[in-house]
Amino acid sequence: MTPQQQKRIGRFLSLLLRHRPEILDLDLDQQGWTDVDTLLHKLSSTDKAISREELDLIVAENPKKRYAFNDDKSRIRAQQGHSVTVDLAYEPSPPPEYLYHGTVSKFVGSIRSQGLQKGKRHHVHLSPDRDTAINVGQRRGKPVILTIRAGAMHRAGYPFYVSGNGVWLADEIPPEFIEN
Ligand code: HQG
């Protein structure tokens, strides 16, 4: 498997595990898990056939740790980023005082008036540090980094969750918790 193939198959896994499991007729359970053997079997009839060892490598080496196995490694899921209905069952957890959101300038006006909204995804995604937020924002153009007063928001009663790969999640960020 070349690094390009690894990246290409990783992208396809994100599509299947977060957004469109129906492409391969996969069943995701309530918490987003799907059976590894079935997944490998279904991939085997596509141009993205991989071995168990190659899947292990894709999961271990994914730069953002996007996928996780369960304890006995019989099931796999995406750690966050879903648009399909799942309950990832992350426990609410107190956030650091500040979190960061990377976006682009054309969205800032709307974000400042409506707050951050989750859109098609399950949650608003927040980064623990500026550098990560810069990477997120860069996907769409020149990044603009918003600082979120997460500690204050949490003390005001809003829940925060942290995914297995260190992405902070919230249902929304009201405008008053976004720093100027
Ligand atoms: C923007 C990637 C206007 C928001 C990343 C963002 C992340 C608003 C876009 C993860 C808005 C949504 C998530 C409002 C939010 N008005 N625009 N009120 N509220 N927006 O992709 O945070 O590589 O759903 O700023 O690294 O960019 O896929 O969210 O630009 O962790 O693993 O609406 O996806 O991870 O875009 O990215 P997205 P995101 P992966």
Image (cartoon, grey):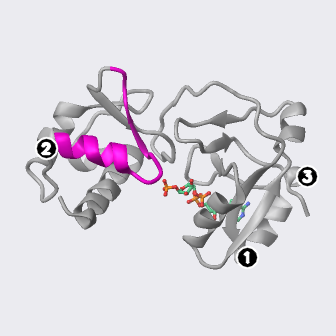
Ligand 1 found in image quarter: bottom right
Query: Crowding near pointer 1: few (<14 within 10 Å), some, many (20+)?
Result: some
Position of the C terminus, as image quadrant, is bottom right
Amino acid type, callout 1: Ser
Comparing labels 3 and 2, the label whose residue is closer to the camera = 2
Q: Which mark is residue 105?
A: 1
Count of labels in the image: 3
Is disc 1 placed on a helix, strand or loop? Answer: helix
**Pointer 2 residue:** 51
Q: Which residues are magenta?
A: 53-71
On the image, the x and y values in percent for residue 25 come to 22, 42
Q: Earlier in the sequence, mark 3 or mark 2?
A: 2
Left or right of 101 in this view: 14 = left
Amino acid type, callout 2: Ser
Q: Which mark is residue 176?
A: 3
Comparing labels 2 and 1, the label whose residue is closer to the camera = 2
Quarter-wise, where is residue 27 in the image? top left
